[in-house]
Amino acid sequence: MPKHRRLKEPEQDRPSHGSQHQDRLDAISPPSPLAIPELLQLACQFLDRHSLAMCVRVCRLWHQALGGQLWKAVEKYIGCKPLDRQKSNGPSLSLISKHADFIQNLFLRIPIGDARFPGKSPIHCSRITELTVDSVGHLEVGHIRRHLDHGLSTFIEEHQASLKKLVLHVSPSKALTDAVTSCSRLESLVTRLPDSEEDLDWIDWYRSCGSRLQSLALVSRTSGDFTTSFRNSAAIFDTLDELLSRVPAATLQSLELEAGCPTLSSLQGQLLLVMKSPELKRLSWPGTSTIPILAKAFKRSRHGLFCQELESLAIRGGKFTAMDLKCIIESLPALVDLDLKWSMGDSTPCQYSPFFIHLGLRRLRIDGSQWATSTVVHDLLCSMPSLEVMIANEVLDTTILEDPRPWICTGLKELMILFRFLSGDEGETLILNRLCQLKGLEKLSLQAELRLLLPPTWNDGHLRFRLDHGLDQLKTLRQLRIFEAGHALPWRESEALWALENWTQLREIDIKMDASAQQLLGHRLKVKA
């Protein structure tokens, strides 16, 4: 009699011993936090690209969770190598094309003599919001320049609906300018001015692009200053009132101008950007005649006050009179950050300090300025309680001896200053007494310069920041994170132990020290010495 064969159960219905075991494990042990894609992305968001690429290779789950983060920002060097030899040239164009849908920030660097740009190529980044293109040197006119302009213009036009920020360190052509103005969602633009600024119609460009940006930086290839072209500023304002009435107000909040030596129309266009931006909060406009031009604009404005919300003003290398500076400061009620580095005045230095005393400045930079003498710097430190950052030229210890007023800027967080000592031990003691009152300091950078007329007991012109010469007075600086001291005697192991014990927040130090002190601090701090 034939034996009956037992029918096999279907595989999908038959219980698996492995799956039952896995179900029991899942019921007993909770899932790993790194198995949750959101938590994994948070844990890996600060990794560099190489470490992130290693994490992507761990398993399929990590690849799916971190793949988009790996390709979110791409840096590619085309035909050149990065200055940092440890960095690679970036992924190949084929890999970039394969993962183009993940790319949001694309950086491309192209050298002289290489016109390869991925224009009209299979690379289409549907989510790209930021594009940076930098050329090594300046691309000359010719077929290379035309090829680059065509490829870059085409790429921008293809992504005009998603681009929000453009950084173009290449000389733009008319085609490239038209491509930039076609970006409907553009908010931030960094670009060079054309080689021939007469080719740029400022009014048309302002209406189509400049008036809807939030951040703009214009850089010129030429060097110099517009004072060489315009000795009489009246020519600038002859037709400016008419231009102001023809254009709408802009939405700029940050404006950086490096105009070099512009034409009259270019200078009027830049002044137009300043005067038609009521929401402007940050302005950087270096040039020897910027302050006189702005002062005259404030006096002659027939369209109401402008820059009323300006909080940060940087005019490096400015040359001005005391009255011009007074006019600017009085016209900017919201100003809290002022940078006048390398500026030059033509009046008595003591005339300048009263202009700043009544301001609510939180940051002031006047290093390298001709008018910022020791008396002015000391007067500001004694008169501005709201100051948080001070970067200045010098303070003479003889000035402090003659003026016993204390430094009232107790909220100071960063102080970078040069001390000149003329009176020996007494001057150094006075400086330490003033510094120990600034208990909120987070960064202290001191440069000491001792005159050659000092007695030989002054250690060959070095500042003695040691425990046996008053360093212990600075133990009140509990919030100090960065300490720099130039021309100081080397620290020993005792000073290093004292710094670790009293400056518990210290993270970086730059001062001469012997081998034992450097070995002790090197394990815990970033030592630059």
Image (spheres, rainbow, N blue to C red):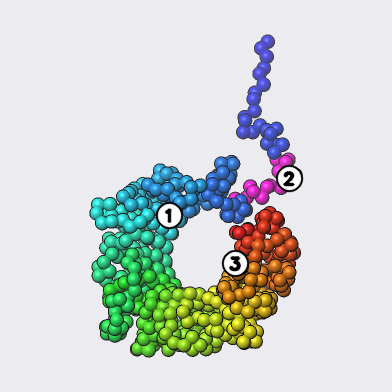
Q: Can residue 411 be seen in this snapshot? A: no
Say which element carries label 3: loop
- Amino acid type assigned to the residue bearing label 1 in the image: Phe
Quadrant (top left/top right/bottom left/bottom right) for the C terminus: bottom right
Apparent side of residue 33 relative to residue 348 in the rendered image (left or right): right
Location of residue 412 in the rendering, given as x and y in whole percent from the top left corner: 62, 76
Q: Quadrant of residue 326?
A: bottom left
Q: Nearer the viewer, mark 1 or mark 3?
A: 3
Q: Is there CB contact under 8 Å for labels 1 and 3?
A: no
Q: Is there CB contact under 8 Å for labels 2 and 1?
A: no
Location of residue 446 in the rendering, given as x and y in whole percent from the top left corner: 60, 70
Say which element carries label 2: loop
How dense is the environment of label 1, judged by Cα within 10 Å: few (below 14), some, or many (20 and up)?
some
Point 47% across, 82% down: residue? 371
**Is residue 50 located in the magenta-colored stretch of the structure?**
no
Q: Nearer the viewer, residue 335 or 412?
A: 412
Residue beneath disc 2: 29
